Image (cartoon, grey):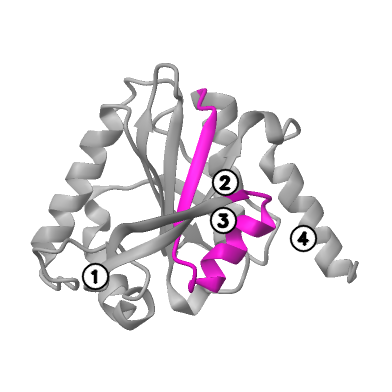
Amino acid sequence: MGRIQGWPATLNEPDLLEAPVVLRPVRVSDARAWREIRVRNASWLRPWEPSNPETPLVRSPIGPYVAMVRTMRREARQGVALPWVVCYGGEFAGQLTVGSIVWGSSRSGQIGYWVDERYAGRGIIPTALAMAVDHCFRVMGLHRLEASIRPENVASRRVVEKLGFREEGVRVRQLHINGTWRDHICYAITAEEIPTGMMSRWRSALAASRSGA
């Protein structure tokens, strides 16, 4: 680890929500908790999660989870992914990854995230995403971030829309989801669009919603 600027990185927001939100690099020791959460949330996540057409959607043995964590950590060392665990109040609450990172003249990445159903609706993922975007643009030196979301996934679309991501159109049959190829809406943002930072924008949006504006 540590071969690229800005990674590994632990980010935290201690006082914006009812409990601290922390992004930290995924660890091999997370595999057991990750499996427990994913299996418990299978019906909650299945309609939206990318699946491999050749393999089962839900895996309960620990081995595949350990393998996935090791793959993520290897990709992080190579500078092509930033795999974070999302913690809320000290508990494993979800995951946020910036993957498919391309350097050179592109300097772009793809965002993916999920949250344990019992923590949904608390502003955790928008807060985590705002921290990740600022880190990617201000520390890592990326220029553009995208998120591909199924049109039916209203909750996930609301996350990026709250933060001001632009809708750029539909990508037809982009990803294999829950047994078939599904259309996705592409949302994107570039560094120039948030000169004061994404956390600043999110703080303002939260303040406005709390005041009823």
Q: Which three-letter amino acid code belongs to the residue tagged 3?
A: Val
Q: Earlier in the sequence, mark 3 or mark 2?
A: 2
Residue 144 at what x, y percent from top left?
Answer: 53, 33
Q: Nearer the viewer, mark 4 or mark 1?
A: 1
Q: Which residue is label 2 attached to?
A: 12
Give the Cα separation between the discs numbered 4 and 1. Answer: 37 Å
Residue depicted at 21% across the width and 73% down the height = 179
Residue at image point 71% right, 56% down: 16
Magenta run includes residue 166: yes
Helix, strand or loop at disc 4? helix
- Which stretch did the figure color magenta? 141-167
Residue 70: give x, y in percent of width and height.
18, 44
Q: CA distance from mark 4 to mark 3?
A: 15 Å
Q: In the rendered image, is residue 98 in sight?
A: yes
Q: Return the residue nearer the eye: 75 or 27.
A: 75
Residue 42, image quadrant: bottom left
Disc 3 vs disc 2: Cβ atoms closer than 8 Å? yes
The residue pinned by badge 3 equals: 21
